[in-house]
Image: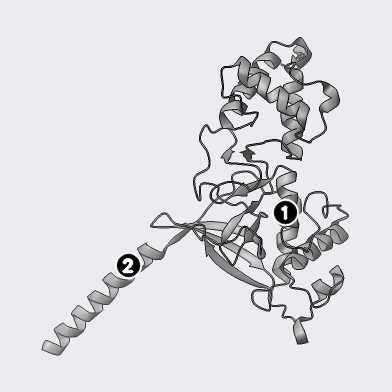
Amino acid sequence: MRLKYLCIWMLLGSLIFSVCFAETYTETRLDPVLPVPEEVRWLLEVASEEVGYHEGEHGWTKYGEWAGDPYAQWCAEFLCWCVSRVDELHGCSLLGSFFPLWSSSNTGRAWFIRNGRYAVRSGEVEDWGYEWLSGETEYLKPGSYIPQPGDYVFFTWTSGPDTDHVALVEYCTRDASGSTQIHVIEGNNPASVSRNVYPLSNTQILGFGTVHDLVEITMRYGNEGEKVRQLQEKLSYLGYLDPQFLTGTFGRATVEAVRSFQQEHHLRTNAIANLETQLLLNQEYEQKQYNDPAFWQVVDEEDE
């Protein structure tokens, strides 16, 4: 009889543990913030088909051979090969335009920063400054950007700022504790193409090359790229910058334009286009557009 009751208690204990365990470890797949572009779906399909590929003798891979160095450390080469394969299969021109073509340490991350599509996981973007989500009024907190399908994840294996590894985001999940997990496809970790999962809180993650333009960034003298060009267009439209300086390079003329705007609006005149400066600039830019007949949309009565 005692054995019978013992078995019942053991069974009940097992059921309770199973329920608690399942509740603790259940993960919810997060929906993308924006629709996944068709080209990104193609890229994920190509990368998925490569899962299981293993490097050959002495580290030889077809990805390295395609890139010009058969024995290269090939995480970046794998992603570039996949994008090239999408171009080949679907008649696209993504490589070098929508996704970077690179192999050296920081070149890919720098490409995303220059093209205005980079989200730092924590802290500042080196040589630029702090970031914030578009439409928000506070700087990014660690882990507040949730990577989207098709984003690139840049890692460092040391405490330094240099990129040591890159992976492709498939999707993200969130568990019962609220922790976010990044599900990726990656090459060269350690010797094959495989799926892996990293917590968003992983301090080895430097940041993300993003599919969508969802993040704004602090800009200063010497910066170059798409975000700088957008800043210059606003300054020019508001009369602070001569149109000849719409170059995408934050040079002396842009320094003086930002400083003049800050001085006129009683901001700290440091010539750094930080969050406070850009929020006020955007507000004035949008207000002028709203009152500018050149931006008014003519609606045909038949279309109403």
Is 128 on the left or on the right of 27, as rendered? right
Q: Position of residue 62 (x, y in %)?
A: 82, 75
Q: Look at discs 1 and 2 and give the one toward the viewer.
A: 1
Q: Is residue 72 above or below residue 203?
A: below
Q: Which residue is mark 1?
A: 40
Above or below for 161 versus 226: below
> Going 74% across and 31% down the picture, which residue do you hit?
230
> At numbered mark 1, what does the secondary structure look like: helix, strand or loop?
helix
Q: Is residue 290 left or right of residue 199?
A: right
Point 63% across, 39% down: residue: 217
Please state which amino acid type lies under the numbered disc 2.
Answer: Val
Determine whether label 1 and label 2 are within 8 Å by CB. no
The numbered mark at residue 19 is 2
The furthest residue to the left: 1
Query: Which numbered disc covers residue 23?
Result: none
Asked whether residue 56 appears in the rendered view, the answer is no
131 is higher (above) or lower (below) than 161: above
Along the line of sight, the residue nearer the viewer: 233 or 277: 277
Among numbered discs 1 and 2, the one appearing first in the sequence: 2
SS at mark 2?
Answer: helix
Q: Quadrant of residue 297?
A: top right
Image quadrant in which the C terminus is located: top right
- Give amino acid for label 1: Val
Residue 75 x %, y %: 71, 68
